[in-house]
Image: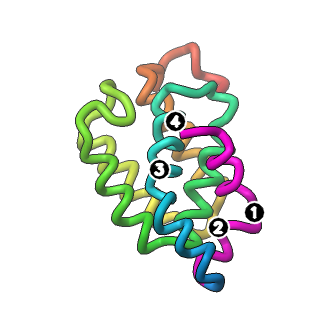
Amino acid sequence: MNNYIINVFSQTEFLPRCGELTPVGQVVHEEGKILLQATLEGIGGQASRNHMDHFADIIFSLNKNCFSYLVVWLKEVMQQDGFPSPRVTQEQKDNFSQHVLRERVNKRRMRDMVKDFTLLCRGLHGTEYTADY
């Protein structure tokens, strides 16, 4: 997925309008799963850890504004073996998904969940290397 799509979707004005503007809702419906998959790939280790807050904000916005789509997409993409990282178990992915779907109010909590999950995906959770992360 190219960075243009991620940048367009992550704009604060775009996702909040998916329910009120039909063309925006259509784009979210058609391309949102790709956005989620690319976001989770980044969290899974394909992007610098410096970007995790941005990825968390995308997931938070999808969760807050496009919840019904997110439920389906999250289930579909997290069922893939080795996705978003071969280091996480299906149980860990299910746990992350459940926590994400419950957090629709507190952006800070979403950012913390994403940071914890990226550490699991990278095999860094609980190491001294990440003590200050």
Amino acid at the residue labelled 3: Ile
Amino acid at the residue labelled 2: Leu
Q: Could you tell me residue 8's position as x and y percent?
A: 70, 54
Alpha carbons under labels 4 and 1: distance apart: 20 Å
Q: Which residues are magenta?
A: 1-19
Alpha carbons under labels 3 and 1: distance apart: 18 Å
> Which residue matches tag 4?
43
Give the mark toward the camera: 4 or 1: 1
> Which residue matches tag 3?
34
Alpha carbons under labels 3 and 4: distance apart: 14 Å
* SS for dot 2: helix
Q: Residue at x 58, y 27 (%)?
A: 47
> Which residue matches tag 2?
15
Give the mark toward the camera: 2 or 4: 2
Q: Is residue 104 above or below residue 89?
A: below
For marks 3 and 4, the one nearer the N-term is: 3
